[in-house]
Amino acid sequence: MSAEQRYARQAMLPEIGYEGQRRLAEASALIVGAGGLGSPAALYLTGAGVGRIGLADADTVSLSNLQRQVLYTEAQIGVPKVEAARDRLAALCSSTRFECHPRGIDPDNADEIISRYDIVLDCCDNFPTRYLLDEVCARLHKPWVHGSIGEFYGQVTLFRPGGAMRYRDLFPDRERLCARPAATAGVLGTVPGIVGTLMASEALKTIVGFGRTLDGRLLTLDLKNINIDIIDL
């Protein structure tokens, strides 16, 4: 297959061009959480031509996932998400390398796994993992994109190495938040689709180096009332 033909519509953008496409092909991204946010993020990073993508998730596909986790099919119920996601994404782009991390990210493996990637996307659903990503990415000087959702609402931001704002600064009440269970509230299926796609856009801009990112800013989304705000942090 011709890479020039495949990415022609993207490479014709002056902000990307074929140099930017080369950067994407040489880049690596780790997606932590292959669920509602990870599904669109992984699809669009793969479609854009990111050369190596890591998938970290310890869960299996369930029937209740299918309303919003668009990577999966009914035939994959019971299959580990990282394997089901890899198979779907490999069918989309055979030139991208996919690496599965079926234990997910935890304090024992976070440094070793994160050190192998250029950028991290936080698509998880719990606060302990988010604070862990904050610590490890700061220590290893890795940029990371944070996204979270609930009901009709979502938010996205980007943390860069050495930036003025970290996740722990944005959400300082760590003990209380980490005591909360993983998200179980209802969610409109399109919310993670939009937020995950915005996360992929932030990652692509960061890899290629164009446009204004959400570094130092927080985008909030309200699909119930169609409101989008950007808050300076």
Image: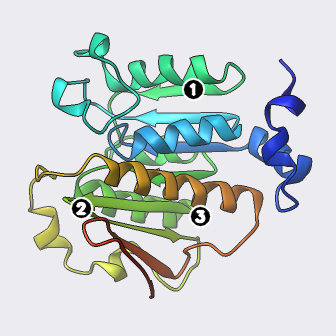
Q: Tell me which corner region of the image, top left, top right, bottom left or bottom right, holds residue 174.
A: bottom left
Q: Residue at x 70, y 56 (%)?
A: 207
Residue 175 image position (x, y, % from top left) = 14, 71
Q: Amino acid at mark 3?
A: His
**Pair 2/3: label in front:** 2
Residue placed most toward the observer, 41 or 6: 6
Q: Which mark is residue 141?
A: 3
Identify whether 71 is placed above or below 197. above
Question: In 3D space, how far apart are the residues under numbered discs 3 and 1 (Cα atoms)?
Answer: 23 Å
Residue that label 1 marks: 98
Question: Is mark 1 in CB contact (under 8 Å) with mark 2?
Answer: no
**Pair 3/1: label in front:** 1
Residue that label 2 marks: 152
Q: Residue at x 77, y 38 (%)?
A: 25
- The answer to whether residue 116 is seen in the rendering is no
Q: Tell me which corner region of the image, top left, top right, bottom left or bottom right, holds residue 61.
A: top left
Q: Residues within 10 Å of mark 1 (few under 14, many from 20)?
A: many
Q: Earlier in the sequence, mark 1 or mark 2?
A: 1
**Pair 1/2: label in front:** 2
Quick one: which residue is furthest to the top in this view? 75
Residue placed most toward the observer, 4 or 134: 4
Identify whether 189 is placed above or below 75. below
Question: In 3D space, how far apart are the residues under numbered discs 2 and 3 (Cα atoms)?
Answer: 33 Å
Residue 35 image position (x, y, % from top left) = 33, 39
